[in-house]
Amino acid sequence: MAGHSKFKNIMHRKGAQDKKRSAAFSKLSREITVAAKSGMPDPDMNPRLRLAVNNAKAMSMPKDNIQRAIDKASANEGDEYEEIRYEGYGPGGVALIVEALTDNRNRTATNVRTAFSKNGGNLAATGAVSHGFERKGMIEYPASAGGEEQVLEAAIEAGADDVESSEDGHTIWTEMEALHEVAAALEKTLGEPQGVKLAWKPNLTVEVSEGDAQTLFKLVDALEDDDDVQTVWGNYEVSDEVMEKLS
């Protein structure tokens, strides 16, 4: 098991995401509705819905909003959304995976392509970069959940594969199929997690220079600002020194 986190800059920068809370609620609602339509509208009977609801709760989304999104699926209301994955390259050769839920494939493809081309990147064929990632379960805890040894011990006991700890918190990795089981076991010992989700974990990371990082973050922000884009994953790592210069 790993002892420190290289993941803090890979998925998103939490400070930036906090500014987009209302947009995040809209995306979470969409995922809840799609998840509820894909199976039973009961989180206890539908693992994907349970995951979506847990993530909404972790973002402090009001219970009424969550229930409304589930009810929309039960009443068969709302648009039909299609799940699409885009892959491409950003500045410095960084590999990016963009997950979208869309009711208009052409609109989303155009927006994603434009974001890449305007910010030093280029869209690639599906499968071009995903071979460099693993599909894993990811459970996040704040640093206040416990010390590195305590979290490591709890993760091993729960059946997790790997733990990365830093002053920012703990990232616990599991096999995709074991995510819910491990998350439930950890909740008994460490409390409620900040996030539980399926992730694209890079096999190798690329350290990005200050110049490339600035353009890369603009690209990631442009993608995340699109209503259809749910998540952006990358294989980049930015040093603390570079982050300080850019903040």
Image (cartoon, helix red, strand yellow):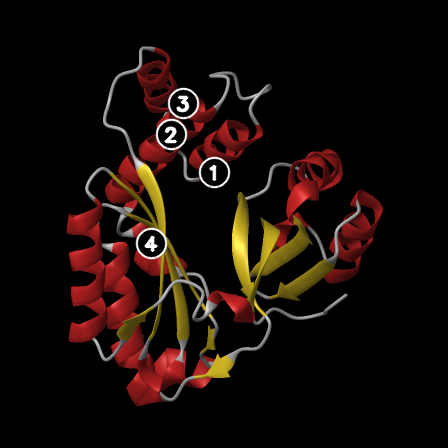
Q: Quadrant of the N terminus?
A: bottom right
Q: Quadrant of the C terminus?
A: bottom left
**Cβ atoms under marks 1 and 4 closer than 8 Å:** no
Q: Nearer the viewer, residue 194 or 83?
A: 83
Comes first in the chain, label 2 or label 1: 2
Q: Nearer the viewer, mark 4 or mark 2?
A: 2
- Left/right placement of residue 209 relative to residue 139 reads left
Of helix, strand and loop, which one carries label 3? helix
**Cβ atoms under marks 3 and 1 closer than 8 Å:** no
Distance Cα–Cα, label 2 vs label 3 = 5 Å
Distance Cα–Cα, label 2 vs label 1 = 14 Å
Of helix, strand and loop, which one carries label 2? helix
Distance Cα–Cα, label 3 vs label 1 = 17 Å
**Cβ atoms under marks 2 and 3 closer than 8 Å:** yes
Residue in the image at 38% along x and 80% along y: 244
Mark 4 neighbour density, 10 Å: few (under 14) some (14–19) many (20 or more): some
Q: Which disc number belongs to residue 55?
A: 1
The residue that disc 4 covers is: 17
